[in-house]
Image: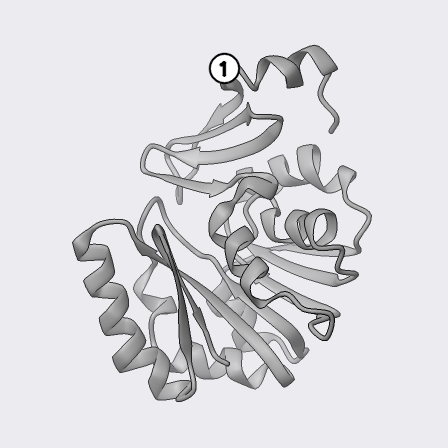
Amino acid sequence: MKQPAWKTGLSYLTEIVLERGGSTLNPDLQLSLKKGRYCLSTPHAIYSYGDLYNNFRNAFRQIDNPQWQPREVLVLGFGLGSVPVLLEKTFGKKCRYTGVEADELIVGWASGYVLPDLTSPIQLYLADASVFVELNHEKYDLIVMDIFVDNKIPPSFETTGFLKKLNDQLNANGMIMYNRLAFSRKDTERSEIFFQQTFKAVFPTARIIKMRGNWMLLNL
């Protein structure tokens, strides 16, 4: 949904709240226009921020090259679709997206505000990602794991069983990008333990792209 030019311009000076709401999963959600981008946030976390979702922007910048051309992309924790926004508009990738989002309110906002401005084909499912990967038989070139409830990753997405399911759904030479918090010392310690004890148990050649506030875990 394209916003009026005056509102977009004003959003560079002050954040403009467009929607407020809550759900069982996320009791306090806000959709705002900020620096010309749609920003989805809770009191403690930013879920989506268009092409300024810098953890993924910076990670994609580090891995991007002419040979990296993912075609089929699975996004677990779709939010407002920052991943397709970045890949389509910033990096010029031509992908087909499968998005999974468990929050009905977020699905509604994404469908109303963001998806109409994208040209990439996107199939967005309202579903629990753990159930989706159990039932899914498709394979992907890129799987993005970006599931948070406020600033916490639910434990069911931190198991070797879940990671093995993701691995089963990768095409040959496919990539997993698993977003982790690294804002505080506690966040960093938890992410380091998860990486060493769980992630590398499934993906022995895994590596980390470290950024301020976030780590991106890669299987390759």
In the image, is 3 to the left or to the right of 143?
A: right
Kindly identify the residue that appears in the image at 46 percent across and 43 percent down: 47
Q: Quadrant of residue 110?
A: top right
Please, is residue 89 above or below residue 69 in the view?
Answer: above
Image x and y of residue 61, in percent: 58, 58
**Which residue position holds label 1?**
14
Please, is residue 194 above or below residue 180 in the view?
Answer: below
Image colouring: one colour
Image x and y of residue 209, in percent: 42, 65
Image x and y of residue 87, in percent: 68, 55
In the image, is 101 to the left or to the right of 8?
A: left
Image x and y of residue 20, in percent: 48, 24
In the image, is 131 to the left or to the right of 122?
A: left
Q: Considering the numbered disc 1 on the image, is that residue within a helix, a strand or a loop?
A: loop
| Residue type for callout 1 | Thr
Q: Closer to the camera, 179 or 124?
A: 179
Kindly identify the residue that appears in the image at 62 percent across and 85 percent down: 173
Please, is residue 220 above or below residue 112 in the view?
Answer: below
- Quadrant where the N terminus is found in the figure: top right
Q: Closer to the camera, 206 or 16?
A: 206
